[in-house]
Amino acid sequence: MVLPGFSRRRVLEAGAALGAAAPLIPTLTLRGEQPWAPNRADPPDAAEGHSYRFFTTAEAAFVEAACERIIPEDEHGPGAVKAGVPFFIDRQLDGPYGRGERWYMRGPWAKGSESQGWQSRHGPAGLYRAVIAAIDRRMRQDFRGRAFHDLRGDDQDEVLKRLEAGRLDLGGVEGKLFFETFLQNVFEGFWADPLYGGNRDMAGWKLIGFPGARYNRSDWVSRFNEPYPHPPVALVGRPDWNRS
Amino acid sequence: MARQKPVDVVFIGAGLTMSIMANELTDAGLNVLALERGAWQDTSTDWSTAYDQDELRYMWRHALFEDLSRSTLTFRNDPSQTALPMRKLGSFLPGTGVGGSAIHWNGQIWRSLPADFRMRSHNLERYGASAIAEDMTIQDWPVSYEELEPYYDKFEYVFGISGKAGNLQGQIQPGGNPFEGPRRREFPNPPMTMSYAPTLFGKAAAELGHHPFPAPSANMSQAYTNPLGVKMGPCTYCGYCEKFACGNYSKAVPQTTILPALMSKANFTLKTGCEVLKINLDSERRRATGVTYVDASGQEVFQPAEIVVLSAFILNNVRLLLLSGIGQPYDIRTGQGVIGKNYAYQIMSEVNVFFEDKLTNPFLGAGALGVAVDDFNGDNFDHSGKGFIGGGYICLWTTGARPIETHPTPPGTPKWGAEWKKSVAHWYSRAVSIQCHGGVTSRRTNFLDLDPTYKDALGRPLLRMTFDFPENDKRMSAFLTDRAAEIARAMGATHVHPKGPQIPYSIVPYQTTHNTGGAIMGDDPRTSAVNRYLQSWDVSNLFVTGATTFPQNPGYNPSGTLSALAYWCADAIRSQYVKSPGPLVRA
C-alpha cells in the first residue's frame, strides 16, 4: 500500500481546521504489508532568513546582551552571540515551541508548588515578551534610565543572578521561570544542530569536542583514554566540505 | 454510530505489548485488530540516519512523545493538595504512534529477581513485620520468576538481547550477574564492546568486593536474525538511543523485531488515527462487547470484539478503565477499590565523576552500554538495621552524553558565565555519571484517579496522579548513592559529586518513563484489578497489559518483565481462554 503523498505538516494543518475535537493523525487501515513510499521522509525544518522575526529591537538588545553573559566569547571560542544563539531563540519563539503548541495550555490557572512545574498562562514566547518588558522597566528605575544592554558586564551578571534567584522584583511577572527557560534556550542554541540557526560553524560542539551527528563511532569505543580526532559533523554537512 | 464487523481480538494501543501478543494470537489463527491513536512510523521513513541524530528535535521538542495539548494528566504530591496539569513533559516521556514508548527507550533490559515476585512475604519472613511500613501496600505477585522464565527467554531471543548469563540453570557463571534468577540458556548475543569509564567502574567495583557485569542490552552487539526471521544490524555506538528512534536497525523496538512478521499476516489489521474513547460493556457490565473509537473524521465508531486487550501504556490504561466504569475505583479515604491503587515509579540518583587525568569520551556510547553491580538490589544484601527494604542497581552507563542534556561541571562551578564556559570546555570529555536505579514501594497515598476539574481536548476528565517517594525508598536511595560514591572514589576520580533525587518528587526534571501500577495483578479481587493472567476480575474477556499490572516497582527498568508477562498472557489466552472463555482463575 502506498501512503498518500501529503506531508506531515499539511496533515496537521488540515486536522487543525477540523477543530480540537478531531485527532490530527490520518486514519489508515493497514493489512498484509508495512506501508512505504519512495522518497518519503520527515526531515527537520531549518531556520531561514537572517533578521529577527519575533524579537522587537528592545527585546533583541536584551537577549543579545544576556546571552553573551551566559556564554561569553573567550580564548576557547565564540560566545553565544557569534554562535547565533539569539537568532536561534528568535526562530524558536516564532514557531510551535514559542506558542507552546504541544503543551497543555487550558485553564483554570493556579500557582502550584515547585513540584508541579510550569503553571504560567504564557507559553515561552509570551513569557519572554512579558518578562523582558518588565526587566526593562526595572532597569530604567534602578539604573536611572539605562537599559540592560547599557550596563557594565558585572552589573549585568548581578541582575541575572537576582533574576535567577527570584529576587528581582518585577511586579509579579515570572522572572525565575523566565531565567530557567532562557538558560535552557541558550544551551539549546549553543549545542543544537546548526540547521536551527545556533551553534554556528559547530562552535558549541568544538568547544567541548562533541562529534555532533556522527553516526558510526564503533572504532573508537575500545580506544581508551585517547583524544578523539575527528571534527564534528552536522546534519547538513561541515563548512570544510565546501571547497571552491 | 458506525459499526464495524466483529473481530476476535481488539488491542487498544499499538505498542510493545500489542506487538508481542498480536503476533502470538494471530499465529493461533485469531482475527486480530489493533487500534492506535497515533501514526504509523518506521525506520527507513521516519528515523533516517540522515536526520535522526537531532537532540533538539527529539529530546527537547518531544517529536516522538505524546502531544499534551490533546491530553495530559494532573499531578500533586499528596492528597491534601490540588492537582494541577502537567503542562509540558518532564519527569516521564510517554510515546505515541505505532511502537509507542518502546521506540525511544535506551534498551536497558532486565529480569526481576525471584524474590521481587514475593516482595511482601519474603521481607516479612526475613526481617519481620516491622520491615513493612504502616502505609506500605506492597503485595506478592500472583506469578513466580520460575513460571515466567520461559517467557523472559522467548522475549530476549526475539529482541536479540546482548549480555552474559550469570546463572545458567543454577550454576553461577563468571562474568555475569551472580544474583540473577536461573536462566535456561545464554543470551542470544554476546555483550557489547565495553567503553572506557564502565570498564574502570567494573575494576573498582570488583576491588571493593562487588560483582560487576556488562549490563544486558537491547542494542545489538552484532548482526542478528531473530526467531521470526527479522534482521537487525550491529550497533554503531552513535549515542542517540534514549528519546530517539534508531535509524540503524540496531535497537530492538517493535518495528525492528516483530512488526515485519506481524504486519504481513492476513489475519492482522492495524488502524492508525483511531483513538479509543471507552471499552463497551453489556447490560450486566460483566462482559466487554467491544470498544468505541473516534477516527480522523471525528466520527465515533463501534468495534465489536470477543476479546479486548487494553495495551495503551499504564497511564492511558488506568484512565480508560476509569472512564469505562470497569472495576471499583480506588478510594483514598476508605482504602477500598483497586483501579488506580499502588501507583509507583523509580527513584533515581547519580554520582557525577570527573577525572583530571583520563579522557572518558562520553559521546562514545549506546543506550544500554554499561557495567552494573546488582549487589544492592532487591534483597541481595542484608537489610538488618538499615531501616528500609528493597534496592536498586548501580550502573555506569555511557549513553552518549548529548550536550544540551549533559554538560557536567564539578561541584562549586557557577552554572553559567565565563568561569562556567572554561570549566565545561575542560571537563566535558573527562566526566561520566554513575546511575543508581532504585525501586519504589507502593504506598496508600500514591494512586491514580480522575481529576475533578481539568479536561482533555475531547472534554473528558484527565487522569490525576498523586505521588511522592515513600520514606522507605528515600532511605534506600541514600544508601545506594553512598555505595555508588564509594565505587567512584575507588576509581581514583578527581571530583566525586553525589546527587540525590529531588525531594519532594517533582514532575519537572526527566527521571524515567517507568510508571507502574494502577491496575495491579494479584490473587484477590479485593486488592487487585487483574489475575495472574492479566485478566480483569470484573470483565473476563478483558486483559490489561504493561507495567500497570506491577503491584510495586522493583529496582529494574520494567520492559523485560512486562514483555515476559505479555508472552505469558498471550499463552494463557491461546491455550486456555480460547478453548473455554470465562474466568481463568477462581477468586
Image (spheres, coloured by chain):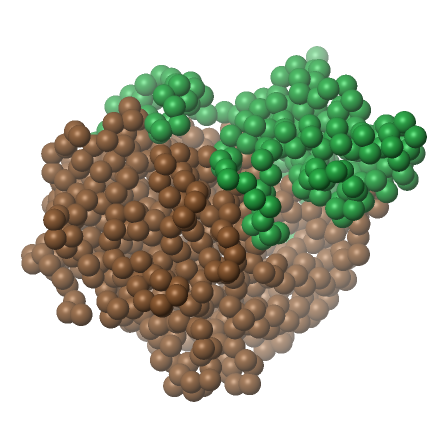
The image shows residue B185, relative to residue B44, as above or below, that is below
Residue A215 figure quarter: top right
- Between B22 and B218, the one lying in front of the other is B22
Residue A100 located left or right of residue B267: right
| Percent position of residue A137, x then y | 81, 30
Residue B149 located left or right of residue A69: left
**Which residue is depicted at the point 7% across and 58% down?**
B580
The image shows residue B20, relative to residue B36, as above or below, that is below
**Which residue is depicted at the point 52% across and 73% down?**
B472
- Between B378 and B168, the one lying in front of the other is B378
Residue B443 located left or right of residue A151: left
Q: Would residue A211 be visible to someone looking at this image?
A: yes
**Which residue is depicted at the point 68% across and 63% down?**
B498
| Percent position of residue B155, x then y | 31, 55
Q: Colour of chain A?
A: green
| Percent position of residue A139, x then y | 85, 32
| Percent position of residue B166, x then y | 43, 70
- Between A225 and A49, the one lying in front of the other is A49
Residue located farthest toward the left when viewing the structure as drawn: B579
Q: Would residue A68 be visible to someone looking at this image?
A: no
Q: Quadrant of the C terminus of chain B?
A: bottom left
Residue B42 located left or right of residue A87: left
The image shows residue B539, relative to residue A49, as above or below, that is below
Q: Colour of chain B?
A: brown
**Which residue is depicted at the point 59% across and 78% down?**
B209
Q: Quadrant of the N terminus of chain B?
A: top left
Counting every numbered tag in the picture gives 0
